[in-house]
Image (cartoon, helix red, strand yellow):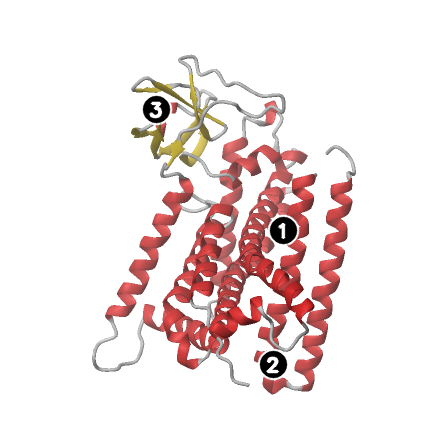
Amino acid sequence: MRHIKQVILVLVVLFSTQLIYGADAHKDDASEEFDPMEMIMHHIADTHEWHVISYTNGEGHKVNITLPLPIILIYQGQFNVFMSSAFDHGHKVVKKGDVYYKLYHEKIYVTDADGTIHYDDHHNVKNAKPWDFSITRNVGSMFLSVLLLLWLFISAARKYGSTPSTPKGLQSFLEPLILFVRDDIAVAQIGKEKAGRFMPFLMTVFFFIWINNLIGLIPFFPGGSNLTGNISVTMLLAMITFLITNFSGTKSYWGHIFWMPGVPVPIRILLSFIEFIGLFTKPFALMIRLMANITAGHIIILSLFSLIFVMKSVAIAPVSILMGLMMFMLELLVAVLQAYIFTLLSALFIGMAVHEEEH
Amino acid sequence: MEGLSLTTIGLGLIIIGAGYGIGRIAQSAMEAMGRQPEISSKIQTAMIIAAALIEGAALFAIVVALMKG
């Protein structure tokens, strides 16, 4: 408790930097009419370049500093790798072989030499799309989190020698968390004998989601990407849970799904339909829950900061900062809570699947 | 800002329903914890699971509302 003042000070300074960055990025947009919706959606979406900082230089020009990321495309058997700076923020058409690529609203399309985009009646783009395996901002952020996790856990694991000793440093931070995942999630839901098999998965999911939620909350350069709020990422995580659950299902688990014991036959048939659909809705809910919670958090925080630029007043800034700080605190809780819920529900589904008949 | 649409009203209804449901769960869980503090960790886990299931249903509705809207 002695350090509580310093901690609060550091947090206030840390989280108010978001505001300064926001101000830099949109200083000269004020004349053009600042559109909060566009700014927020741009932040939520994945991008092909990593925005570092924007500022207005001495001559009044806006300077954007971005980190170009590699673009990897496959189109009609043609394999292309180049940096996203070749697109010049979507202003230039890139020619590779005899194919022209254009970056249009963060999607890459195949166009003609002028970069013409064709629309159908519903204003959807008709141009062909190459297969896009690019290292986008989200992928870059994921690599960063993986490196961070490897460093954290390998350096902590090295300290466990043959002779037991008191945990020190990183160890004493990670050990209670690992024990929490083991005892309160895995063992509690799956049971003592079988929990060990699923521990690596549950641990990975818990720490991967948590660290990515936290990286998403860092307001400046290497952080701030909306990775766990991206539906493809959560879909893959939920799909892994789905596969593990169903591949480790016991006879009694499948029996309870397709031929529920102890009920009349017509209801068994009805229940088997419902249970079969339930197989898919469970991971679907996992996917949507994580995505919606994290994206909603990002949208709320950015909306609070947009308030200053919408109102065009400095007087609103203290209110905005305070409410933003409160949201950041709440998001710190949500970050760990969503990781916990995802892991807990995964463990619960696995526990239901591996449960052996006792009665 | 195109005025009040049916989607907006629907989203409001979803929030009312989910909020009421999760509120009831929290209320019952807290009463149970008050009666039997020694098993409060078990109650807490059950509470979070039930709340997560309601939240899941609410999120389905939100996704459908946003897709239709």
Asked if A227 appears above or below B22 in the picture, the reply is: above
Q: Which residue is mark 3?
A: A86
Which badge, 1 or 3, is on the more N-terminal residue? 3
Where in the figure is residue A248, as x and y percent of width and height?
43, 68
**Picture mark count:** 3
Left or right for B34, reference A71: right
Residue at the extreme front: A265
Q: Amino acid at mark 3?
A: Ala
Could you tell me which chain the residue with mark 3 belongs to?
Answer: A
Amino acid bearing label 1:
Met
Q: Position of residue B65 (x, y in %)?
A: 69, 45
Q: CA distance from mark 2 to mark 1?
A: 32 Å
Report the quarter where the C terminus of chain A lies. Answer: bottom right
Query: Whole-Å distance between the Cαs marked 2 and 3?
Result: 59 Å
Query: Residue A53's image quarter?
Result: top left
User: In the rendering, which numbered label is found on residue B40?
Assistant: 2
Q: Position of residue B57 (x, y in %)?
A: 66, 57
Residue drawn where x is 57% and y is 52% of the image: A288
In the image, what residue type sits under mark 2?
Ser
SS at mark 2 in the image: helix
Residue at 58 percent of width and 57 percent of height? A281
Question: In the picture shown, does residue A307 fall above or below A342?
Answer: above
Please give the residue where the numbered disc 1 appears in the rendered image.
A323
Graded by Cα atoms within 10 Å as few (under 14), some (14 to 19) or many (20 or more), the crowding at tag 2 reads some
Instruction: Evaluate if marks 2 and 3 touch, with contact meaning CB atoms under 8 Å apart.
Output: no
Q: Establish whether labels 2 and 3 are both on one chain.
A: no
Which one is in front in this view, the residue at disc 2 or the one at disc 1?
A: 2
The residue sitting at 46% across, 22% down in the picture is: A61
Res. A155 image quadrant:
bottom left
Q: What kind of element bears circle 1?
A: helix
Query: Same chain for the residues at labels 2 and 1, yes or no?
Result: no
Other-residue count near label 3 (Cα within 10 Å), few / some / many at <14 / 14–19 / ≥20: some
